[in-house]
Image: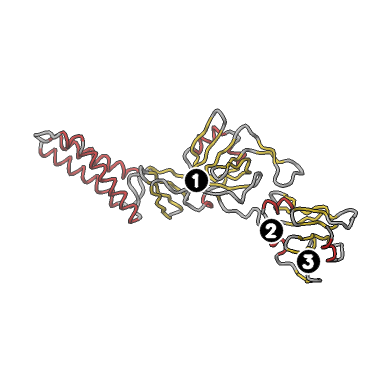
Amino acid sequence: MKKKKYIFLIIGLFLIVIPYFINVYSIYRLISVCLGIILVDISFIFQEKKNIFLLFYFPILLLIFTYSIDYIKTYTLNLKSIFVIENKINEKVSIYNSLLYRVFDCDGEYIFDNNYEDNYNCDTSLITEIDINKLLNEPKNSYHEYKNDFIKVRGKISKISGTSSIELQAYTEVDGSVNGYVKFNETSKLIINLNGDYVSNYKIYDYIIVVGLLDSYDSKTNTLTLTDTLIEENNIYDNYDIHVIESSKCSHELKEYVDGVYLYCLDNIYLDYKVDKYELSYSLKDKKVTLDSIKKGSETEVIDDKKVFYLDKFNIISCSEDKNIFVSKEEKINVSICEEE
């Protein structure tokens, strides 16, 4: 009996200890530790005097002890954890989930997330982008395919709920539309919980790219939900081409365009972002651009204390901080129009 006891005890301790010396993520390390704890517990059965505490409580204490050691070495030494289950996103990104923490494997870089407090921790470029139209084409199937996976979604914002969440819906582009307008399909939607991220720079119809954990699906409303989200910085609205619509017949009167900005012999100005076409007035209101960014890099001249900016497609007379006039290139610069109302 004693011989069997020590055989089970030695083999059990060996199976518990050896995974700590193997610095590779493998489910077999976890199996080894659990099997070792079972064998150690079995060894107590062969004692002449059975101890209820050893049989029922010692395995639990041993499990807590081994987990604690694994937690400490993972957190302090950045070694590969034993008590984790791998969620492989793709060849470059894996998430290793444990009871009290998770580890992000970002193409070989390991990031520890204690108590699941962080959002997505890897570079967003490591995940392939999914278009919202494809994701919401069959939301139930999408949920089964990507359930509990981190995914990167690109779409247009259909609703903003303060700083707590935003919604994306599938959409259809409308020929000739401007200012980002599309027709949304309201039969399904993706809710993105922001977890502290702010979207003050985003508006309805804006493109957005977000990475998050596909957490749930509501079959009644066809709603998918993303948590642990991270909004990807993008330069969609940083670059544009300017298109000017000249007045067919100039009235030589100022036309108010947007607060503090007037048009002179111009009907409208558009900014072409390649993905969307916006009226300049709309972009100024939405703060996609500023007057300073429009003026940047242009040649300047001061005439009668008024600063004139010479752009490629039109000119700007800066009458004051609160009054700027966009003037057709076909018109001779005359700063006296600053006095017009």
The secondary structure type at the circle numbered 1 is loop
- First in sequence: mark 2 vs mark 3: 2
Residue 276 image offset from top left, x and y in percent: 70, 49
Front residue (pair 253, 211): 253
Sequence-wise first label, 1 or 2: 1
Q: Label 3 is placed on what type of residue?
A: Tyr
User: CB atoms at circles 1 and 2 under 8 Å apart?
Assistant: no
Q: Does residue 253 lie above or below 67 as drawn?
A: below
Q: Are marks 2 and 3 in contact (CB under 8 Å)?
A: no
For the C terminus, the quadrant is bottom right
Quadrant containing the N terminus in the rendered view: top left
Residue 292 at x, y percent in the picture: 69, 62
Residue that badge 2 annotates: 290
Instruction: Choose the circle earlier in sequence order: 1 or 3.
Output: 1
The disc at residue 121 is: none
Q: Position of residue 316 (x, y in %)?
A: 78, 63
Q: Quadrant of residue 34?
A: top left
Q: Residue extending furthest left?
A: 48
Q: CA distance from mark 1 to mark 2?
A: 29 Å
- Using a 10 Å C-alpha cutoff, classify the residue at mark 1 as few (fewer than 14 neighbours), some (14 to 19) or many (20 or more): some
Amino acid under label 1?
A: Asn
The crowd level at tag 3 (other Cα within 10 Å; few <14, some 14-19, many 20+) is some
- In the picture of the structure, the residue carrying the numbered disc 3 is 310
Q: CA distance from mark 1 to mark 3?
A: 45 Å
x and y percent of residue 117 in the render? 42, 47
Q: Which mark is residue 195?
A: 1
State the residue at coordinates (14%, 39%). 5
